[in-house]
Image: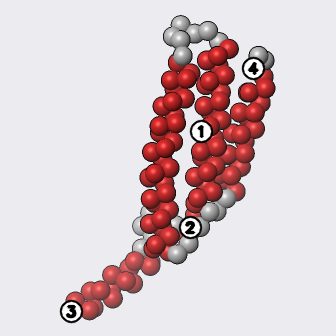
Amino acid sequence: MRPVIPYVVAAALFGLGVYGVLRRRNAVLLLMSVELMLNAVNLVLVTADSTVRAALPHTGQTFALFIIVIAAAEIGVGLAIVLHLYRLRASVVVDDVPLGDDTDDRGAADDAVREVRR
């Protein structure tokens, strides 16, 4: 087997994943692009494991299995965050996510709650 073909396919998958991360505004599509990049890395690891004889056998397949486990955990946590974001904002657009100390929306709601409590 020529290892060039899987490497080219993995590079194309990784490139599509990077393009998806940089261009998509939807959080679910962003998570799918990250998964595409992780699968490209898995393809490289398994191809390298099958073509290059290392001192430790099956290390590429073992690392690929760990990446699959981490990707499953990432999807679980990522989808929970996306669902919470949708419940708060009724949108899953990544540009609308408040970052840092941007408390403009929450500040007005907190002031209203304080006024009611007085």
Q: CA distance from mark 4 to mark 3?
A: 71 Å
Q: Indicate whether 47 appears above or below 66.
A: above
Q: Quadrant of residue 60?
A: top right
Circle 2 residues within 10 Å: few <14, some 14–19, many ≥20: many
Give the color scheme: rainbow, by chain, secondary structure or one colour.
secondary structure
**Residue carrying label 4:** 3
Image coordinates for residue 7, horizontal then vertical, percent = 73, 27
Decide if residue 118 is on the left or right side of residue 106. Answer: left
**Residue carrying label 2:** 92
Which SS class for mark 3? loop
Q: Are marks 3 and 2 in contact (CB under 8 Å)?
A: no
Instruction: Report the disc number at residue 38.
Output: 1
Numbered disc in front, either 1 or 3: 1
**Residue carrying label 3:** 118
Instruction: State the count of labels.
Output: 4
Mark 4 and mark 1 lie on one chain; the one further toward the N terminus is 4
Mark 2 and mark 1 lie on one chain; the one further toward the N terminus is 1
Image coordinates for residue 93, horizontal then vertical, percent = 59, 67
Numbered disc in front, either 4 or 3: 4
Q: Amino acid at mark 3?
A: Arg
Q: Amino acid at mark 4?
A: Pro
Q: CA distance from mark 2 to mark 1?
A: 22 Å
Mark 4 and mark 3 lie on one chain; the one further toward the N terminus is 4
Mark 2 and mark 4 lie on one chain; the one further toward the N terminus is 4
Which SS class for mark 2? loop
- Residue at the left extreme of this rendering: 118
